[in-house]
Amino acid sequence: MSPEVALPILIPLTAGALSMAFWRSRMMQRLIGVAGTAALLATSLWLFASVQEQGHVIMNAGGWAAPFGITLVADHLSAIMVLLTGIIGFAVAVYSLPTIGRGHETFGYYPLLHLLLAGVAGAFLTGDIFNLYVWFEVMLLASFALLILGGERAQMEGAIKYVTLNLLSSVIFLSAIGLLYGLVGTLNMADIARRVALVEDNTLIDIVAVMFMISFGIKAAAFPLFFWLPAAYHTPPVAVSALFAGLLTKVGVYALFRVFTLIFNQSVDFTHEILLWGAALTMLTGVLGAAAQFEFRRILSFHIVSQIGYMLMGLALFTPLALVGGVFYILHHIIVKTNLFLISGIVYRLKGTHDLKKLGGVYKAWPLLGVLFLIPALSLAGVPPLSGFFAKFVLIRASIEAGEITITVIALLVGLLTLYSMTKIWAEVFWKKAPDEDSAAKRVAPVSQRHLWLMILPIVGLAACTVFIGLNGQLLYDVAEASAAQLLDPQGYIDAVLGEQP
């Protein structure tokens, strides 16, 4: 038994149930929110340490051996993703204390937060393709409910687009699972990988692969069905936006990395060529959308799309170095993008708007906040010595070594346009003179020093992670390299899950 692989799922579910039990106690819900996410972080550290020692950590639910029972599997990639889930969950829970109002808490903010974290962790740890679908639906349910908390018009409009496209993704995903089960007769991903190589008609496998690509591509906000993300992510409370920005699309990216290295690796020239063009178009459309925006969270939302392209680029090139770069980029981006959204929330609390034209003077009034913005912003743009530079450097080098000059040029261009967008935010929000009172945003209630520091604390922690990664790039590179080595060795995953089965 390896309880550490099940606890990242069980702890959020238990915390969510306790939050429901203390429905009428705001203090207890907030306490459980912080304590539950702290426990998730501690457990994820335990799991990460176990994987570093053992390579794979397996748990068969109910004692039923794979492929007959439900299997939970942690390898290097899933363990680091669960660890980042714990970090982001804890940071958002602390940030929520001064920013989530009584109304949102009354309508179930904290139980939904725990349910979402359970869904994310479950998707990272499941070894069963149907249970991956189940955890996706858990995430969709929790995220949709979080998205519409408050019931504002903009929220409802964004939520309709969000849920419509994600339900389309779910239909395609479930249909693809049915076709795959009809071809191989199993739902365990390791067993599928073993049996799919025996299927004589690769055309059918390629069709199913494209269906999975479309489904996961929608959830990852890849081109062309990405527009649900910038339509939705700027509408809920900032804590919710930050949680979504850090984790939700990365589950789709993780699923692509998992199935297109473990299961659909027979027709790389076909499937990964589609992924490569998708990566290029995702990068370009996302960054051009960001360049055209003048609203803080809309810019950040479009940049989520463009950065997804870099991650897909690593998978599409499908070389050892490219996969290292792709994994490195996922890890870096989760921390950086969450932090930028949290910073946008402080700016809103101080100034009462996200509109760049109505902002200004933030650096003069709060220089610490300006510095805290520059760290993730410059990292996102790939400025050395921060984490984003090393992630982009590895990907650019991998693309050059693979002879893919077009994607190399696009990646460099997108990096420059990203720097332009971050510079625009810096100039408009932090550097320019504050607008006159009569032309400024709506008046907002003063933020207490206690609440302000509670908001800044997780931002400082995430910024410290970004700087640490930048100054100790080799450490994260080694983690990414171990993940890439396992992804390129599907037989190791199969043997770990199925053992000595013929």
Image (cartoon, rainbow, N blue to C red):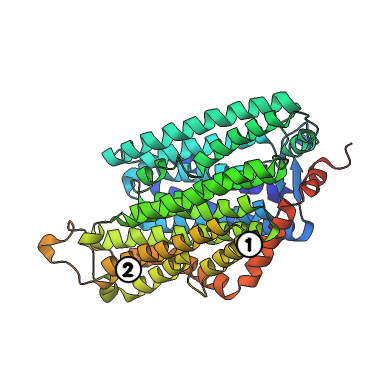
User: Which mark, residue 426?
Assistant: 2
> Depth check: 436 or 57 in front?
436
Label 1: element kind: helix
Q: What residue is drawn where x is 55% and y is 40%?
A: 216
Residue 245 vs 387, above or below: the answer is above
Label 1 vs 2, first from the N-terminus: 1
Q: How many residues crowd mark 1 within 10 Å: few (<14), some (14–19), many (20+)?
A: many
Q: Amino acid at mark 2?
A: Trp
User: Which mark, residue 398?
Assistant: 1
* Apparent side of residue 366 relative to residue 411 in the rendered image (left or right): left
Q: Quadrant of the C terminus?
A: top right
Residue 168 vs 150, above or below: the answer is above
Image coordinates for residue 438, horizontal then vertical, percent: 10, 61
Residue 107 image-quadrant placement: top left
Residue 173 image-quadrant placement: top right
Q: What residue is drawn where x is 68% and y is 44%?
A: 268
Label 2: element kind: helix
Q: How many residues crowd mark 2 within 10 Å: few (<14), some (14–19), many (20+)?
A: many
Q: Amino acid at mark 1?
A: Ala
Cβ atoms at labels 1 and 2 below 8 Å apart: no
Q: Nearer the viewer, mark 1 or mark 2?
A: 1
* Apparent side of residue 479 relative to residue 408 in the rendered image (left or right): right
Image coordinates for residue 342, horizontal then vertical, percent: 39, 59
Residue 201 vs 20, above or below: the answer is above
Q: How many numbered dots are placed on residues in this image?
A: 2
Q: What residue is drawn where x is 32% and y is 76%?
A: 367
Residue situated furthest left in the rendering: 438
Regarding residue 470, the answer to whether it shows in the image is yes
> Depth check: 229 or 213 in front?
213
Regarding residue 242, the answer to whether it shows in the image is no
